[in-house]
Image (cartoon, rainbow, N blue to C red):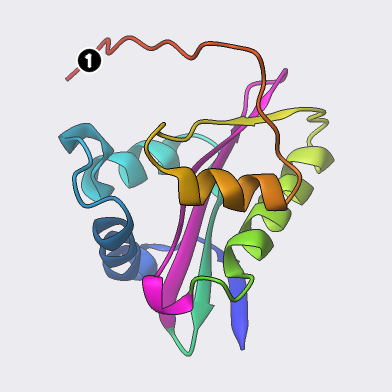
Amino acid sequence: MVDIQVYRDSHFVGVKAVWEEAFPNDSPWNRAEVAIRQKQAVQPDLFLVAVDGGEVIGTIMAGYDGHRGWLNYVAVRGSHRGSGIGAALVEAAETRLREMGCTKINLQVRMANRAVTRFYENIGYGFDDVLSMGKRVAG
């Protein structure tokens, strides 16, 4: 039975393993040691994990700035993909964001990751006519 929980320090090793599988070539500033510490300082209740038999099998990190919600680090172990865990994590994060007053949720997907794009389309997300831009200001 899969249980969706708020992240706790005891989940760290499992989250790190899920992320290393899902995002094998991610940048150093996105590594678990950095990102989790940063998230624990801001809206830690929006960092959720899916746990099955004591094992972390999925993650989602959400945020809300008072205007828009964001989804990040949506990841499910390869062995559990296609079983509804990703959709359940997104739904849990959406519920929390809605309860905070959020009316629109954004997310970003790397252009090469078409499988993930299809996943989001299947759960109701669509393409916005925007260009995402970013700037590293530290690290």
Left or right: residue 74 compared with residue 69:
left
Q: Is residue 75 magenta?
A: yes
Q: Does 25 sit above or below residue 66?
A: below
Along the line of sight, the residue nearer the viewer: 55 or 128: 128
Q: Nearer the viewer, residue 127 or 90?
A: 127
Image quadrant occupied by the N terminus: bottom right
Q: Residue at x 53, y 70 (%)?
A: 50
Q: Amino acid at mark 1?
A: Ala
Report the magenta residues as a range: 55-80
The residue located at (59%, 81%) in the rendering is 2
* Vertical placement of residue 106 versus 118, above or below: above
Residue 34 image position (x, y, % from top left): 25, 40
**Label 1 Cα crowd, 10 Å radius (few <14 / some 14-19 / many 20+):** few
* Relative image position of residue 91 (x, y in whole percent): 72, 55
Looking at the picture, does residue 47 appear above or below residue 131? below
Mark 1 = which residue?
138
Viewer-proximal residue among 109 and 9: 109
Task: Report the magenta stretch's main SS.
Answer: strand
- Give yes or no for residue 79 being in the magenta stretch: yes
Q: Classify mark 1: helix, strand or loop.
A: loop
Q: Is residue 133 left or right of residue 62?
A: left
- Quarter placement of the C terminus: top left
Q: Residue at x 78, y 50 (%)?
A: 95
Q: Can the viewer see residue 90? A: yes
Tell me what residue is drawn at x 65 percent, y 53 percent.
90
